[in-house]
Amino acid sequence: MKTLALIVGITLAQFAVSVVAAPENTATRDPAAAKSFAFGGIGVAGLTSEGERNLRAVLDRPDASQQLQGALARATPAGELYILVGLRRCDRAAYEKVFGSVARPNDDVEVARGCMISREPFRRLLSQIQEGRFDDYLTRPTR
């Protein structure tokens, strides 16, 4: 009887973990949910950031522009930046339209560049996107 109770307890515990983890995993695959903004290799290993990987996954879809535009309303500030980079890449007309209407808060956004994590003004990052500073990153292979 104790063995059965233990097995049921373990099974329920595993089920609870998977139910809780599912929405989080779905959100982490969404560039709009990004907590920080990073392109190129980051960290000691120089790996591609999760946000960049998620953006690349959306850009591989045939409906990338629609997906990105639809995600804009629920995007974090870092997510908005990824969406703008993505639209600039896949649909310049939509990018121009969205870029002109996006709010320009005075807030800072967490940014990872190489091994350094800092906070940078949202407006400065918007200017860098407009200048095309992130365009080449999406043509490079990921790590």
Image (cartoon, helix red, strand yellow):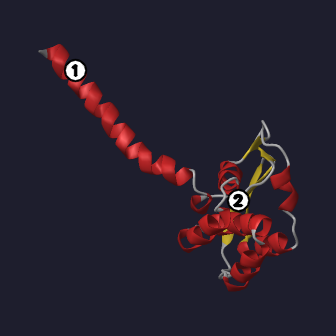
Q: Residues within 10 Å of mark 1 (few under 14, many from 20)?
A: few
* In front of the other: 92 or 124: 92
* In front of the other: 101 or 120: 101
Residue 73 location, quadrant: bottom right
* Residue 79 position in % (x across, y down): 63, 64
Is label 1 in a helix, a strand or a loop?
helix
Residue 30: numbered disc: none
Residue in the picture at 70% in, 53% down: 60
Taking the image as shown, residue 104 lies to the left or right of residue 113, namely: left
* Residue 43 position in % (x across, y down): 75, 42
Which residue in the protein does label 2 denote? Answer: 37
Extreme residue toward the bottom, this view:
101
Extreme residue toward the front, this view:
62
* Residue 49 position in % (x across, y down): 71, 48
Relative to 135, does residue 94 appear above or below in the rendering?
A: below
Which residue in the protein does label 1 denote? Answer: 6
Type of amino acid at the residue the image marks with label 2: Phe
Quadrant (top left, top right, bottom left, bottom right) of the N terminus: top left
Type of amino acid at the residue the image marks with label 1: Leu
Residue in the picture at 87% in, 65% down: 133
Residue 127 location, quadrant: bottom right
Q: Are marks 2 and 1 in contact (CB under 8 Å)?
A: no
